[in-house]
Amino acid sequence: MQSNASLWSATSTSPTFPPLMANAEVDVVVIGGGITGLTAAMLLSTTGKRVCLVEARRIGCGVSHRSTVHLTEAVDTRYKQIESDFGKQGAQLVAQSSRAAIEKIAQLVKAFAIPCDFLRRPGYLYTEKDKDVAGIEEEHDAAQRAGLPVDLLPEAPLPFANKGALRFPDQAQMHIVRYLASLATAAQAKGTRIYEESRVITIEDGEPCIVHLEHGPVIRAKDVFVATHAPLNRVFLQTKIAAYRSYVLAFPQVKIPDGLFWDTEDPYHYFSTFDVDGVPYLIVGGEDHKTGTTTDTDEHLEKLLAWTKSRITVPAPSFRWSAQVEESVDGLPFIGRNSLSEHVYVATGFSGNGTTFGTIAAMIVTDLVNGHANPWADLYAATRVKPMSSATTYLEENIDFPMHLVSDRLHPPDAKSPAEIRPGEGKTIRLRGERLAVYRDAQGSLHAVSSVCTHLGCLVKFNNAEKTWDCPCHGSRFGVDGAVLDGPATRPLAKKLLDTRHASGTIDARRGAEAGEVRDGATPSRKDAE
């Protein structure tokens, strides 16, 4: 079951913007055109800042358009845990900031008449297991102490049996791509200069900061906000987050009771219904796993389908997709000034609450850039370290980097030659002592790139649902042509030219050459091709 475009991207269009072709100088550079970057650009422009937003690909085409768009105070980390790790006041600030984000989105929708079908609806944390009922009750008490008007129910209003639920009133949902498209247009009208196909490769913190684009131009600015989901940070901040893939199915003409729903499984399932152009869709997500740790990613979509069918009568899904989720080591996102920086700000670790936390991040950074106090800035500070609460998770998540960096090189590649790679498959092979990542497309042509991630040198693995090369260390993802799809990597995988003589994947033993002999940077000669 291959993944494809999300429901949101398939049912909407976005405005286009040119790449930045000349050097520029502004007050603030915002890097990333998703919910976080566009909201920040809008808010900063409204305060009078000269803002330039640069997006590596297209506006909203990253994680934002693959969201399930649950705007909620019910964050992934339970309030009981937040209270334990950050205190009662910390839990209250999480609840307050989440509510403020929902209301900020509602305000922007009204102010700019954004046609994104924004609607208010309740949210339900529920369980199907007797052993988890006590946890629901404890979460009810913790959420109330955080100031949330939650209700404890004997069951959630679902078409299948469950043991109890916690109701969060007045949550929200919307068509995310239509929201972002209108937000980009409104931000531009406010003075934001927006550029697409303008990938940032390095940032120099200073006075001014200097932002270098892949295709040459540089931007000088007083402040830089890296709103890229995965920050352009090679070491320290990367050790405090971990990338996961989460899977989504959308079933047409299915209605369930109004609401956003989350169960208590680990990983949990989340679902809701949403009408798009008059068609009701049941949108179901879950089956999370750490990015790059499995090749048979189709299996997760199949498991999600089986889970849904065991509870709700559904037709075949019309849309199936996956998204990147950045998990924080201590359960809350990192927002604010980057470590060892004076003028560079970051926002990451949103877990499954990207639309809500992305809006919170934009609000916090707008205040910080303008020198204003923000009531949530200290709680979410990007430089914080919570050694007692996060030490175990920190060690568990970061053991992957040295383990994969060393052990993956000791394992044999997936195939001995390109002949073993079928159309639609990607496998690693070793040719002339170099390990390559090779994909064969539907027409039988081979696409070879280096298998070494350009972030910190781990070896990528093929994702057969998305047709991408994924890094198991820090979650960077690349297209079959090597192009960067998700950071923290900023540079593509190096392309490798396979000898056309061996395009079929055979081995020429007579010449003593392995299939697909590597010819870096040159087209095979006529003699080689004979």
Image (spheres, rainbow, N blue to C red):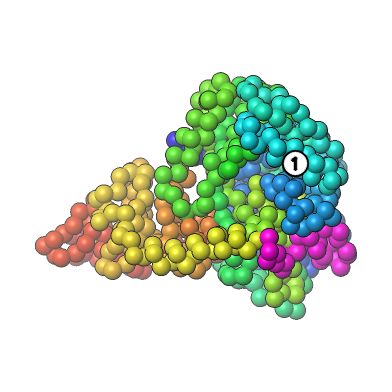
Name the side, left or right, on which 507 lies relative to 314: left
- Residue 321 lies in quadrant: top right
Q: Which residue is mark 1?
A: 138
x 65%, y 27%: residue: 162
Asked if residue 397 lies in the magenta stretch, the reply is no
Q: Position of residue 395 (x, y in %)?
A: 56, 63
- Residue 51 lies in quadrant: bottom right
Looking at the image, which is closer to me, 20 or 159? 159
Q: Position of residue 23 (x, y in %)?
A: 67, 70
SS assignment at label 1: helix
Count of numbered labels shown in the rendering = 1
Q: Quadrant of the C terminus?
A: bottom left
x 75%, y 75%: residue: 342
Q: Quadrant of the N terminus?
A: top left
Asked if residue 377 lies in the magenta stretch, the reply is yes
The residues colored magenta run 362-389
Name the side, left or right, on which 38 lies relative to 254: right
x 49%, y 61%: residue: 400
Tag 1: amino acid? Glu
Please rate how many residues cluster around mark 1, counting C-alpha atoms within 10 Å: few if below 14, some from 14 to 19, many from 20. some
Tell me if I can see residue 250 in this picture.
yes
Q: Position of residue 197 (x, y in %)?
A: 59, 57
Looking at the image, which is closer to me, 471 or 522? 471
Q: Position of residue 329 (x, y in %)?
A: 64, 59
x 76%, y 28%: residue: 153
